[in-house]
């Protein structure tokens, strides 16, 4: 009789494996908890390494936060600057909970916190999380606050409305149609500000440069960080030199079925003028009939046939004239020759161009997943080893590690008895 216990059935070993797995998960969970507590709200970045160069400020939402996340400030370092960019930030409304685990101050509150630090030019890259009803109030509030703090000019980046944009804020209060409305109101407000509010047409500049953005079309990739920092630096230099950088009209938003308004009416009238039948005429509603008419026009004019009115189709119809080169310039990557100096302060995050910083919660979560995967793999290897041992025992019973010394002795005595009989 076998007195040994198979390892695959050893409750002690199974308990030890369970305790190891639980301990691993507990450690990983502690990392996540520690990471959440270590995250600081409103991680403002200050750079004072540009000598006597002008001082500027940059305030934005997560579309600008990529600059901080990748710790790549590129051409911005030709200025002394303060940067406050937060995920899920709104301009005047209460911000939503960010991917970094906290609710940031909105743009207006951030500007007031930075009172005295905004410098000569304030760059704003915000609006992607704003509800449409707050746009007018948001623009007015930012301009008034900047004037009150003595800022010489406000440069506001247009919101992207290319066909690769599919972002909506977490509470679904904004969309590409909201972004178009934002751009329209920005251009109108700039025209009424006598040059104080300048519009930097990031939407047009980045049109077609999908590699600069994540899959939602608005958040930056590392290449996009290089592009946006170069674009901002060049635009600020022009503003400081006295140029008016604002476009004559807002960038074009791709029209698809479901769109409504004056732009749709203009497109429908353009189709009619081109000899394309549009059932219902220029009623301002982009339905399936309008989509078919657009596709017909695109086929006849050697355009990409999509049924959607992109920039090329709008230009061809004569409903949009941006009067400029729409090919994005290739951004130059600035290689630092020395480590930049950073002013001290409670909310300062040091700049380090040689290290891309990832949010701690992301690193900790990855650690949890890796720990669980390692535990599963280890358990699988253990089970395979036990099955192999059982197979060996069935084929080689005399040398099975599961047999006791007494079993082996009895087996030897039995063999001697057989020999004696012969």
Image (cartoon, helix red, strand yellow):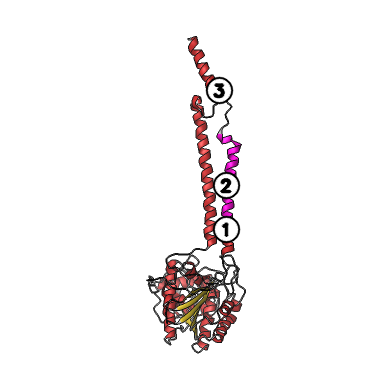
The residues colored magenta run: 7-33
Label 3 or label 2, whichever comes before in sequence order: 2
- Residue 138 visible (yes or no): yes
In space, the residues marked 2 and 1 are separated at their CA atoms by 17 Å
Q: How many marks?
A: 3
User: According to the image, label 3 marks what residue?
Assistant: 406
User: According to the image, label 1 marks what residue?
Assistant: 32
Label 2 or label 1, whichever comes before in sequence order: 2
Image coords of residue 161 (percent x, y): 49, 73
Mark 2 is surrounded, within 10 Å at the Cα level, by few (under 14), some (14 to 19) or many (20 or more) other residues, namely some
User: According to the image, label 2 marks what residue?
Assistant: 21
In space, the residues marked 3 and 2 are separated at their CA atoms by 36 Å
Q: Nearer the viewer, residue 412 or 300?
A: 412
Q: Residue furthest front?
A: 344
Label 1 or label 3, whichever comes before in sequence order: 1
Quadrant in the picture for the N terminus: top right
Image coords of residue 90 (percent x, y): 58, 74
Label 3: which secondary element = helix
Mark 1 is surrounded, within 10 Å at the Cα level, by few (under 14), some (14 to 19) or many (20 or more) other residues, namely many
Against 126, residue 150 (above or below) is below
Q: Residue at x 50, y 89 (%)?
A: 194
Against 414, residue 254 (above or below) is below
Q: Nearer the viewer, residue 227 or 163?
A: 227
Against 52, residue 43 (above or below) is above
Image coords of residue 175 (percent x, y): 55, 71
In space, the residues marked 1 and 3 are separated at their CA atoms by 53 Å
Mark 3 is surrounded, within 10 Å at the Cα level, by few (under 14), some (14 to 19) or many (20 or more) other residues, namely few
Label 2: which secondary element = helix
């Amino acid at each position: 009789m076998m007195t040994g216990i198979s390892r695959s059935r050893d409750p002690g070993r199974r308990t030890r494996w369970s305790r190891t797995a639980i301990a691993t998960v507990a450690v990983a969970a502690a990392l996540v908890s520690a990471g959440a507590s270590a995250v600081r709200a409103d991680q403002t970045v200050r750079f004072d390494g540009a000598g006597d160069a002008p001082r500027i400020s940059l305030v934005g939402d997560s579309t600008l936060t990529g600059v901080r996340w990748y710790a790549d400030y590129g051409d911005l370092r030709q200025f002394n600057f303060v940067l406050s960019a937060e995920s899920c930030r709104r301009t005047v409304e209460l911000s939503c909970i960010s991917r970094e685990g906290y609710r940031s101050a909105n743009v207006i509150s951030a500007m007031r916190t930075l009172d005295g630090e905004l410098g000569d030019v304030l760059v704003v890259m915000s609006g992607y999380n704003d509800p449409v009803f707050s746009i007018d109030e948001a623009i007015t509030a930012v301009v008034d606050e900047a004037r009150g703090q003595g800022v010489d000019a406000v440069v506001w980046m247009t919101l992207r409305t290319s066909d690769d944009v599919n972002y909506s804020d977490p509470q679904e209060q904004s969309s590409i149609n909201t972004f178009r409305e934002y751009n329209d109101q920005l251009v109108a407000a700039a025209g009424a500000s006598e040059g104080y509010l300048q519009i930097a047409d990031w939407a047009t500049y980045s049109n077609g440069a999908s590699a600069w953005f994540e899959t939602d079309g608005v958040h930056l990739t590392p290449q996009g960080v290089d592009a946006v920092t170069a674009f901002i630096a060049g635009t600020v230099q022009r503003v400081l030199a006295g140029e008016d950088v604002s476009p004559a009209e807002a960038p074009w938003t791709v029209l698809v079925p479901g769109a409504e308004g004056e732009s749709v009416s203009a497109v429908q009238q353009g189709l009619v003028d081109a000899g394309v039948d549009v059932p219902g005429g220029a009623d301002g509603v982009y339905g399936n009939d309008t989509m078919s008419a657009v596709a017909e026009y695109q086929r006849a004019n050697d355009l990409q046939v999509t049924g959607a009115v992109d920039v090329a189709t709008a230009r061809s119809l004569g409903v949009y004239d941006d009067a400029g080169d729409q090919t994005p310039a290739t951004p130059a990557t600035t290689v630092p020759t020395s480590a930049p100096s950073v002013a001290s302060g409670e909310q300062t995050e040091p700049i380090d161009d040689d290290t891309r910083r990832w949010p701690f919660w992301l690193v900790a979560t990855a650690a949890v997943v890796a720990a669980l995967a390692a535990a599963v793999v280890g358990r699988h290897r253990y089970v395979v080893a036990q099955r192999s041992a059982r197979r060996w025992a069935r084929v080689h019973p005399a040398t099975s590690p599961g047999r006791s010394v007494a079993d082996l002795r009895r087996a030897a005595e039995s063999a001697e008895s057989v020999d004696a009989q012969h």
